Amino acid sequence: MNPLKRIKTLAISNCKSLLYSSSSSSHHFQNPSSPSKSHLYSSFFCTLIQTFLSCYRFTQALNSFLFMRSLGLNPTVHQWNHLLFRFNASGLVSEVPNVYSELIKCHQSSNLFARNVLIHAFCKMRMLDMALEVARDGEADVVSYNTVIWGFCDNGMVTSAVGFLSEMFKRGVGMNTISCNTLLKGLCDEGMLDESESLMNMFVCWGIGRDIVGFNTLLSGHCKLKAMDEAMGLVESMKGEGISPDVVTYNTLFHGFCRVGELDKAEGLMDVEKDGFGPNAITYTTFIGGYCKRKQLDKACLFYKEMVTSGILPDVVTYSALINGLCKSGQLLKGYSLFRRMEKMGITANHVSYSTIIDTLFKSGKPRELSIIQGEMVVRGIILDLVSHTILLDGLFKTGMVDEAEKVFKHISSLQFKPNHFTYTALIDGRCKAEDLKGAELALSEMQNRSICRTVVTYSSIICGYVRNGMLDMAVDIMNKMKDEHVFPNIVTYCTLMDGFFKMGKLEEALDLYEEMLKEGIDANKFIVDVLYNGLRKNGSMKKAETILRYMLEKGLPLDCVNYTSLMDGLFKQGKIEDAFKLELLMKNLVPDVIFYNVFINCHCLLGESGQAKSIFYEMKNMGLSPDNATYNILISAHCKEKKLDEALELFHEMNSTGLMPNAINYNTLVGGLSQHGNLTKAVDLLNEMAVAGFCPSPSTHRKVLLACSNLKRADSILQLHEQMVQMGLRPDRAVYNALIHVLCTLGMTQKATVVFKEMLGKGIAGDTMTFNALILGHCRSGHLDKAFDTYSQMLLVGVTPNIATYNSLLGGLSAAGRMEEVDRLLHEMQNKGLAPDGITYNILVSGHAKISDKKKSVLFYCEMVRNGFVPTIGTYNVLISNFANVGMMTPAKELLNELQKRGLSPNSSTYDILISGWSRLSNETEVKRLLKEMGEKGFVPAASTNRSIARFFARPGKKKQAQKLLSKMYNVKDG
């Protein structure tokens, strides 16, 4: 049995026997027959309860306490005080008032220690009125008031806290350095440095000297406000007063310099003062964290080595900083490896380490691995704090896992966390990206109802949501609302709105916003330059874009690599390749980054110059730049388009060998490329590898894989691969179902397509025009016209609007069946719905009427087709020519041949066969020879039926020898 369980069982059994042997009431055991035994059991229970509390077994602790009281056991005042202290210190703060109440029941009064613990508990629970009431209503000392002052300061009510000093004077409660330092911290936390220094001087006047804690508190305040000169001055003042700076002092300074990015000054100070203090784990961790945040991992690693060499063991905070630095520098594998190595070294990861790994998994596109990490956290009893939950919420939204994100937000509330403005901003941003604008608006209202400060970032998130959905009026309304609340738009807000107006083609409104921004005193930066330049050039105002760019340069705003990259991209897309390459020369003073090289590589790939793109790729590597996932994706995509699949696979495997993890986009690009070019086996192998890596195929990949199955007549694999991709995380939405239905219908598997359609409807996904079109086309191709029209009727019944493709499928089906009267009726219905025939419609009409020898209508539709700017296909021309040639009308047949050539079409083998057979029937030897010669020059061979027509023509009386000679000479054909 567990020792604690054994103790509890023993205590309960002994206490019960004691109770039953007593003649007293069992309701409250106030006067036990043996006082010494009662005190013994009380002590025993108190020890048991404290043991449970120290093990964080709160339920057992509380149950034991309640059982002790039900037995009527009465601990001593000293034991009660210990219980109060333990309940308060362990985190079971909410039970402290109940325990205190039981103390009063037993002893009718309490001492000052118990009252101070109660005050502290009320302060921790933010029940400041109750804390104040306890302090005022009875005996109080300096500890009581210091605790109340701490409570008010901790809740941001510093002014009220300072007011208690006069109350302490009136009650004759002396003040001490703790009173001073507590108030100093409260004022510094609120950024009230002048007031904190005045207060410190006031305490000195009252005879309370300044100590190292007070100076360090002030120093921290200056560092938080990035006032490093004042901070250094304060250190000199300390030394002047004979107070030697300690390790906390220097760590605070180091942290301050790291915050302002002056790590060289922090290092210089450490070198000078190293002998005066002993650097500890916090010292080294501060430098490691500072360099990691600036992605200077080499320097961070040097400090790590020095730390270990000095005999100082890195702690979980040190490792968390390194892991965070590696992950944010794109070295995700190294970061994850260090996370696992840390555990092997006996250092238990905390919620910060796990939060970094969670964030990394999201950013690397591996949200499916989260369950493993979360499982570990549950087993190890690691509870995420509000920051970690916010990271999880944000990551789930950004990876499209909207339902899971919403569950996390509900879970936050159930854990009694109070979501802050960061949490709500992540929620609003996520809902906006999921196009749940009503949900975003609701969250904004909740913030107002809960008095949570709505910052410029919060408002910018919802503005971005409206802009993304083209709701610019609503976005402008929100910006006006935030101004009314004295939350002023920043450069991001203006950037977002300007970008939205440009994308909607509203140039004047975008430029008006730019002018407004300048009037508000917000200077343009490189992001604004990018929005202005791209917005103007994409709206055809290239000259104005270049004018603004020149104006920015004249103002002294330096363009960075991103701006030049945008400019080059614009020139490339305008076909100004030479200008783009000249611009590259202007950039010699700038260090090109990966994005710059990606634009250049992409340009050459678009020009079909994959060899030149590869050269730039190697040049980039020689420059010391590491290609990113986008670089490889551009090259893999280009090689797939050029059918260089082996080279595309080589590039993919190269990523792994360099430590760069292929992401979901890389996998999707390669799987799609392999599928498009018929290498389905390799595509499926890669799809399996993708599943193991935890990535989800995109709807585009799904469509390409299924089309490959269709092209290769692998009907058996279609449903199997569809199910596999769904299990990998592909959300079966309407687009996915449409792709599956289309492929099944293409292969004539209309029964299975219908089953899939019913499954789609069963999941609450309504069919759209594409869905019904695929089914109608499938039925028509299978010759099931009745089913096609039933589907068409169902389409109209559920309110789905047919388009021209719908009617073309039905018209084609009817035409193929020779039901031209129904074709004319359906055409009339189509036109009544406001749909005009397109090229496909006319081809169906012309061919259909020609096939039933209705020359009048076929020519009528042909003339209408040409008049409306459509060019008939060669197949349509062939049917028309055949219609005339079959009845010996070769003059209009010849005119049609001339017309098709004028329209840029070339006769095919069937065209020549039709014409040769026609002229043969008219015994026109000259035309037959001319056409046979022309046909041969184009590499065509007459069909057997054409050869028979020629033979019949030359086999007439007196022509047989000529026929045999002609056929044997030209085609080595024997007599037919």
Image (cartoon, helix red, strand yellow):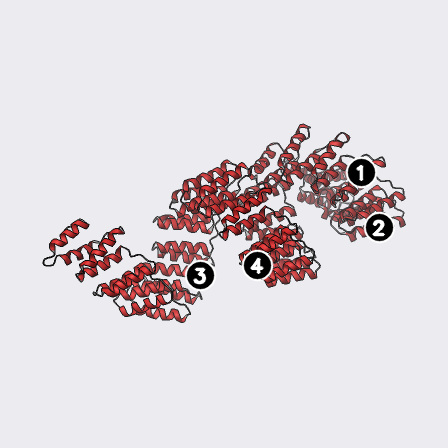
Of the numbered discs 3 and 4, the one sitting upstream in the chain is 4
Q: Position of residue 803 (x, y in %)?
A: 41, 64
Compared with residue 793, is residue 932 higher up or lower down, i.e. above or below? above
* Mark 3 residue element: loop
Q: Are marks 2 and 1 in contact (CB under 8 Å)?
A: no
- Labels 3, 2: front one: 3
Q: Which mark is residue 166?
A: none
- Taking depth in this image into account, of 632 and 432 the one nearest to the observer is 632
Rounded to the nearest angstrom, the CA distance separating label 4 from label 2 is 58 Å
The residue at 70%/62% (across/down) is: 484
Classed neighbour count for the residue bearing mark 4: other residues with Cα under 10 Å, few (<14), some (14–19), many (≥20): many
The residue carrying mark 3 is 768
Classed neighbour count for the residue bearing mark 3: other residues with Cα under 10 Å, few (<14), some (14–19), many (≥20): some
Rounded to the nearest angstrom, the CA distance separating label 1 from label 4 is 53 Å
Rounded to the nearest angstrom, the CA distance separating label 3 from label 4 is 31 Å
Compared with residue 897, is residue 23 higher up or lower down, i.e. above or below? above
The residue carrying mark 2 is 164
Classed neighbour count for the residue bearing mark 1: other residues with Cα under 10 Å, few (<14), some (14–19), many (≥20): some
Of the numbered discs 1 and 4, the one sitting upstream in the chain is 1
- Taking depth in this image into account, of 474 and 592 the one nearest to the observer is 592
